[in-house]
Amino acid sequence: MKRVVFIGGGPAGLYGAILLKKALPGVKVEVYERNRPEDTFGWGVVFSDKTMSGFQAADPESHDAIIRDFHHWDAIDVHFRGETIRSNGHGFCGIGRRRLLNIFQERARSLGVEQHFQTEIGELKPFADADLIVASDGVNSRVRTHHAAVFQPDIAVGKCRFIWLGTRQKFAAFTFAFEKTEHGWFQIHAYQFSDELSTVIVETREETWRAHGLDGYTAEQSIAFCESLFAKYFGGCRLMSNANHLRGSAWLNFNRVLCAQWHHQNIVLIGDAAHTAHFGIGSGTKLAMEDAMSLVSRVARAADVQGGLRAYQAERSLEALKLQSAARNRMDWFENVARYSNLEPRQLAYALLTGSQRIGHANLKLRDPGFVEGYERWLAERSGVLDAARPPMFLPFSLAGMQLANRVVVSPMAQYKATDGVPDDWHLMHYGARAVGGAGLLYTEMTCVSPSGRITPGCTGLWNGVQRDAWRRIVEFVHTESTAKFCLQIGHSGRKGSTQLGWQRMDYPLATGNWPLLAPSALPYLEGISQTPQAMTRADMHEVRGEFVRAAQLALDAGFDMLELHLAHGYLLGSFLSPLTNQRQDQYGGDVAARLRFPLEIFSAVRAVWPAQRPLSARISASDWAPGGLSEEDLLVIAGALKQAGADVLDVSTGQTVADQRPVYGRMWQTPFADKVRNEIGIPTIAVGNIFEADHVNSIIAAGRADLCALARPHLSNPAWTLSAAAEQKFQEQRWPDPYLSGKSQLERNLERAAQAVGPV
């Protein structure tokens, strides 16, 4: 390469230019910036201690200059409802954005990088001979916009408005404060970044912002409003703005940007031009600088520029997705402060600290053992455990008249091993092993209420006395040999019935012996492949309601502790709830209230025969993950109606309604839906979906995001998952079966030896 041009002189462009000039001294490196060298819009930027170690390796000179101007702090303060909760051990550094840019400008100048200020770049023709053009021109990138058809930016506008201000108040910790007004909640993110100055970001929901008339305020009026609202945190200091380029209101929406493609010909995007991360995790500048490190490393080593650009995108797009996932979680938390406003201050602070899911219970305990131990003790006292801290997953829990020893649930897992719906020795072994494995609550697989309501010929059922007696045998074993409670999940397959076993061709019809299907509408699950179901008549509905009631009565006779109705995953009752699968024109189709009518008839009929002291649950799909499917408003209506009908807990899952769904997977990926239902509707919830570590369970329960956590696949590979988690956390109160006690002591010794071999973290 002979010439490289950076469009945009922010942290991404300047740092990239520095690293490229270091790696390839003979290359002409130029930076073009529209503003003056001393201009900046914003105040401080934040880096973690870990981030700084990476910058030291990349360019020690700029790293050393930065740390000389750093303001370092270790604590986070959360102010809520008159209380201040402090957590230590977080290790952050702040520096003024203007000072950071000046350091980079000086460093770039010393290396021979050509810098051009107050230069607007309208088109790229002047750089036609450049080997590489780096678009580092920020969230509103003109380069990205000009080539939008190639870069395919996905831009989502946040639900909050924010204003980025400064103050001379000195904050002893990274500070979050929440104030409620007559129109809703406002919050500040504040931190000191120099000896004299601090950043203050004020944020609120769009509708709250408008209700206060802030959409008509000038910048000066908005600053005065914020000063008044949060005056007690500023110690008499004024708020200031350096956003002189803004006219009228200085409030912004955060735009989440992610591009499908990051390079085109000799053009490449870095920093906010390629992706953004919400300021709630303070990582936008970090991401930009790490982009620069990756780009230079890949391009400098590559045999050709295009190969280097492909390697850069492959490396950084994954990291950006991870960070954006965390940022999305944190942004969602701050957008929905009202959802958490009923939490006690301690729990709200814990929920905030772990809201991105990048910091879990174990990591928080490493950072601040005293904070977590005190919090665990507080949680335990609220759960009736006095004078003892314990991991949150081992807190007891009450549902109706049922007491659970802990918060771990063995999720329903289809076995496809029944004959004529009758569970056999396989099921006794399967459920028995997991019951003695330590979980507080054990679920059956979806058990069908009639032969025609089965998913496959191998599904368990409960429509006759033979099946009841076979289930009773298993229930009695669970009750005799464990402390686990046993929940029967009942359902009807609807249009997803009469299919092959799970390890065969899932969701495909049987080769022979298919039975007729029922559904709210005559829509096949797999177009051109699945059987077309019959749209249910009122007589069909009456018959199916009777089947559910019969199954509930048989479940009571069999001795189950709890019952759950399957209203999810595109099975019969779930198909009534979704507008994608319910296209009826009668009173059972249309708006969400009409689509709810038949599932509520079933639920109410079952509630009438199921004892009040035994919990009754419903499994719901909170999202169809498909255009035109269930909305957030639909979810809240459905959850509220089920609560009103007598549900004791909701088991919150998502998807599997339609075959063309597009879920967004990840760790604990469905937990936000359980969180939403629990904290907005006010009903206990069970979280499901890629929860596979004890730390996941501890974090979810401690933050109040759900009351129970259901794990499926981890229990397939390790029926004693809960016992293992207890040993790993040195929780001695967990009950082990007497014949397994020698295994307990050996596991604990082995874990202790492994910990000693690793040494202190």
Image (spheres, rainbow, N blue to C red):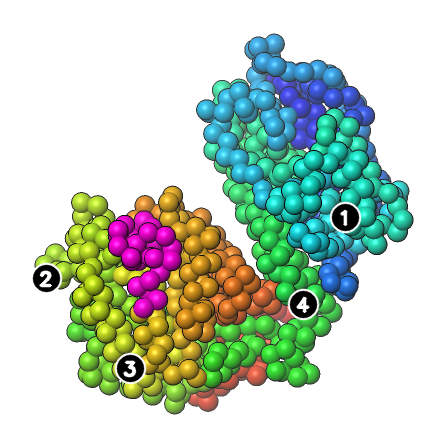
Q: Looking at the image, is mark 1 or mark 2 nearer the viewer? A: 1
Packing grade of label 2 (10 A; few <14, some 14-19, many >=20) is few
Frontmost residue, 318 versus 605: 605
In the image: residue 494, left or right of residue 755: left
The spot of residue 60 in percent (x, y) is 76, 36
The spot of residue 716 in percent (x, y) is 38, 68
With respect to residue 378, does 85 lie above or below? above
The spot of residue 595 in percent (x, y) is 33, 57
Q: Which mark is residue 218?
A: none
Which residue is the site of mark 2?
513
For image coordinates 71% across by 20% down, the residue present is 34
Of mark 1 and mark 4, the one earlier in the sequence is 1
Mark 1 touching mark 2, by CB under 8 A? no
Mark pair 2, 3: CA separation: 30 Å
Packing grade of label 4 (10 A; few <14, some 14-19, many >=20) is few
Mark pair 1, 4: CA separation: 22 Å
In the image: residue 378, left or right of residue 97: left
Q: Amino acid at mark 4?
A: Glu
Of mark 3 and mark 1, the one earlier in the sequence is 1
Which residue is the site of mark 3?
553
Which residue is the site of mark 1?
190
With respect to residue 262, does 459 lie above or below? below
Q: Is residue 587 magenta?
A: yes
Packing grade of label 1 (10 A; few <14, some 14-19, many >=20) is many
Residue 115 at least partly seen: no
